[in-house]
Image (cartoon, rainbow, N blue to C red):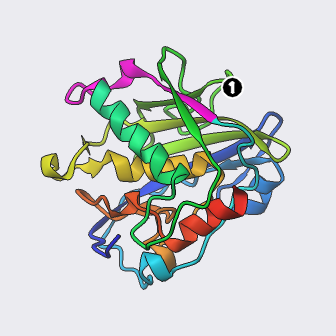
Amino acid sequence: MTSRSRLAVLLGLMAISMTANPVSAQSLAAAQAGRAAVPVAVVTAPNLVTSSPGPCSDSKYNLIGPKWKSTLKWSYKSSTTPSYLTTSQVVQVLKRAFNNITMERNDCGRIDRVSASSSYLGTTSNSLGVTKAGACGSADGHNTVGFGALPAGYLALTCVRSVGTSITETDIRLSNGSSWALALGDCLNDFMLEAVATHEIGHAYGLGHVGETNHGRLTMSTFIDGTCENQESTLGLGDMKALEALY
């Protein structure tokens, strides 16, 4: 994950419990206490300058609090696939993104030390638990990934539901107002689905944001580095330490 930050778009997290009152998105303590964290609307930030160390030497991480105590079983809402992509190709990229997290894929020479796991259940017609307004929708007991409208400036948002220290449900909505690429060779000013999905799946497993200015090379930094950038699909040291702290 090298430093080439020309365009940054916010990647989002929302953490809620079944009985919650909204608080600031920046309040990790509230999320850890099982209350709601709603993302602050931030638009695209061109020419973002960071003073971040390389990903393999940056050990910073934040946790939401809870974690999965069983395999995360997820489905893809195929009816939301953008017309210029195919469902099968999107699913393959999403599977790879899940593996990036559960298998600690990195360029730092570290071996996989985490016990987190995932299982793809297939396509689904279940509703996405993230609304187009950028809020968490109704819980339905399913973990669903799909595309849909989102507020301006967001590439994706994740909703994580928990009871006590256990995550019970997660949903990921990817913006259908953004242009996506599934492979670098096909990218023409698009955002790389694998990099964005890896970040959001990190949230789904309990990882919080780290600041962009000082930790912008990590997968869990607040912004994606720009179009046709896939380096954040591989984990940095802090991303791995966060997973290892939980799993």
Quadrant in the picture for the N terminus:
bottom left
Rendered view: 100 above or below 113: above
SS at circle 1: loop
Rendered view: 230 above or below 151: below
Q: Position of residue 72 (x, y in %)?
A: 62, 36
Rendered view: 139 above or below 69: above
**Of residues 181 and 175, the one drawn nearer to the viewer in this rendering:** 181
- The verdict on residue 78 being magenta is yes
Q: Which residue is mark 1?
A: 139
Instruction: Tell me the quarter of the picture where residue 112 sits.
Output: bottom right
Horizontally, residue 100 falls left or right of residue 183, namely: right
Identify the residue at image location x=80%, y=33%: 18
Q: Position of residue 192 (x, y in %)?
A: 29, 50
**Of residues 213 and 43, the one drawn nearer to the viewer in this rendering:** 213
Identify the residue at image location x=23%, y=57%: 228
**Of residues 176 and 142, the one drawn nearer to the viewer in this rendering:** 142
| Count of residue discs | 1
Magenta residues span 72-87
